[in-house]
């Protein structure tokens, strides 16, 4: 049955930073360097036994074709970093925790080049201005020639890089896990400026990439705010809360803007772990509307619909002009749903069992489903030229197009 109804809950993967760093993934405990595992904070034993919602039965109304699949190398496994590829100039660029960076043809999947590396590459890649840039778990930043894969320059930041670097406006912008944004010269990697933002004692593991606008850099922060910076010098221009840091405990106060905000025309959209989504006039910082539907998974924008995923797996379709909920799809509860993408007239998300789900943008009903593999899809799918590309935690990359 293809149902669309109402449900609510809270996300299940967290990062404690500075004095405490912990990562929780639905149904598994993460243990990585510098991290400690915390059990029993967020659900009772009875809740843990519920498990993911069974796959809903429906009659497909859209056909999906896999164009190709390939390996990017050793995937993120249980690191909880949500690796995803990037598409630029007809190529797919994908990084692996072990295995370097690879470039694939968007349509055929043929490998154009491979940059081998022993670095634990985690944050990236980002692409633009003829570069592919990737970050590492030890703070490395590596810039490669997008055409050949040759190393152009390297740099270093003070903490792990989980978010993909962003290239544009003559600079490379790198978000590190200590709350710092660093701008490097795109030509030679020289540091131009940096900006610090305090990170709460407890926050989600991971953070979204910054978003570029004409002369602006927009950053979603772990304290639940979005900040606009001057791209020229990193000077703060405005700050708007998305999720309020309210509550008696650090857990209650978690309000991360963890997914990458979306710039649509002159409006910046952002969503928070607190379950709130806001629309902000980008030049002025004036809040335009606020919605109580959202989550840490991030956003995707269609022509008139904004799609966001809550931590419990509910997928929402919001009116871009008002923020009102157009539909809710609760059939993916507890399935570890990724951030969304928009492909044509459909919203697409991945889940922790390796499935991809296509939903109609206008009403949220399921239209198609396929499975990449048995490993989780934690990073949001990406779409370019009508082709959707996704990467799972085993490092497998695949491309899909909608049938005619």
Image (cartoon, rainbow, N blue to C red):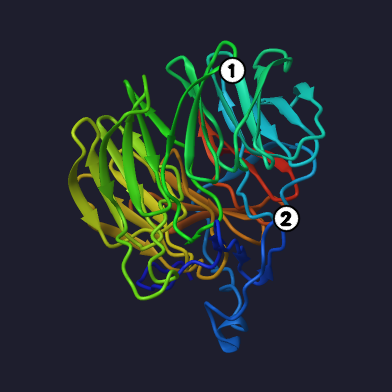
> Residue extending furthest bottom?
46
In the depicted structure, whether residue 248 falls above or below residue 299: below
Q: Residue furthest front?
A: 19
Identify the residue at horizontal 36%, vertical 63% (top origin): 274
Residue at left offset 54%, top offset 63%: 14
**SS for dot 1:** loop
For mark 2, give the secondary structure.
loop
Label drawn at residue 61: none
From the top left corner, tell me how far across and down residue 100 is, in percent.
77, 32
> Camera-side residue: 46 or 255?
255
Q: Which residue is mark 1?
A: 189
Furthest-top residue in this view: 187
Q: Is 310 placed above or below 389 here? A: below
User: Disc 2 designates what residue?
Assistant: 33
Please give the name of the residue rendered at 22% of the width and 54% of the height, measured from the top-left corner: 290
Closer to the chain start, of discs 2 and 1, is 2
126 sits to left or right of 315? right
Nearest the camera: 102 or 335?
102
Q: How many marks?
A: 2
Task: Give how far across and how far down residue 389 sits, in percent.
Answer: 60, 38
Q: Find residue 137 and report its horizontal and vertical position in percent.
A: 68, 42
């Amino acid at each position: 049955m293809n149902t669309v109804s109402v449900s609510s809950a809270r996300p299940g993967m967290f990062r404690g930073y500075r004095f405490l760093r912990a990562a929780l993934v639905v149904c598994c405990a993460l243990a990585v360097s510098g991290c400690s595992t915390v059990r029993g904070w967020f659900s009772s034993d009875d809740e843990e036994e519920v498990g993911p919602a069974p796959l809903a039965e429906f009659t497909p109304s859209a056909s999906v074709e896999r164009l190709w699949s390939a390996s990017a190398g050793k995937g993120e496994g249980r690191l909880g970093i949500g690796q995803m590829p990037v598409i630029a100039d007809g190529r797919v660029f994908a990084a692996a925790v072990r295995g370097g960076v690879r470039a694939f043809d968007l349509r055929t999947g043929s490998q154009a080049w491979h940059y081998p590396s022993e670095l634990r590459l985690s944050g990236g890649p980002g692409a633009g201005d003829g570069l592919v840039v990737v970050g590492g778990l030890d703070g490395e930043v590596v810039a490669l020639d997008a055409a050949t894969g040759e190393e152009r320059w390297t740099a270093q930041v003070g903490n792990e890089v989980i978010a993909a670097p962003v290239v544009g406006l003559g600079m490379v912008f790198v978000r590190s896990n200590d709350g710092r944004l660093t701008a490097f010269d795109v030509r030679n990697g020289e540091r131009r400026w940096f900006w610090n933002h305090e990170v709460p004692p407890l926050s989600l593991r991971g953070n979204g990439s910054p978003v570029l606008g004409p002369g602006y850099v927009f950053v979603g922060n772990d304290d639940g705010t979005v900040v606009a910076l001057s791209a020229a010098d990193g000077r703060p221009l405005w700050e708007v809360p998305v999720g309020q840091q309210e509550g008696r405990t650090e857990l209650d106060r978690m309000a991360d803007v963890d997914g990458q905000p979306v710039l649509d025309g002159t409006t910046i959209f952002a969503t928070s772990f607190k379950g709130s989504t806001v629309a902000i006039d980008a030049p002025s910082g004036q809040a335009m509307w606020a919605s109580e539907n959202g989550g840490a998974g991030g956003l995707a924008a269609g022509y008139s619909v904004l799609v966001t995923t809550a931590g419990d797996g509910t997928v929402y379709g919001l009116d871009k002009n008002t923020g009102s909920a157009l539909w809710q799809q609760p059939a993916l509860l507890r399935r570890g749903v990724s951030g969304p993408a928009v492909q044509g007239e459909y919203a697409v998300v991945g889940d922790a069992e390796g499935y991809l789900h296509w939903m109609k943008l206008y009403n949220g009903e399921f239209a198609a489903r396929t499975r990449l593999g048995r490993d989780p899809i934690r990073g949001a799918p990406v779409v370019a030229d009508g082709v959707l590309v996704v990467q799972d935690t085993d490092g497998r990359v695949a491309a899909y197009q909608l049938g005619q």
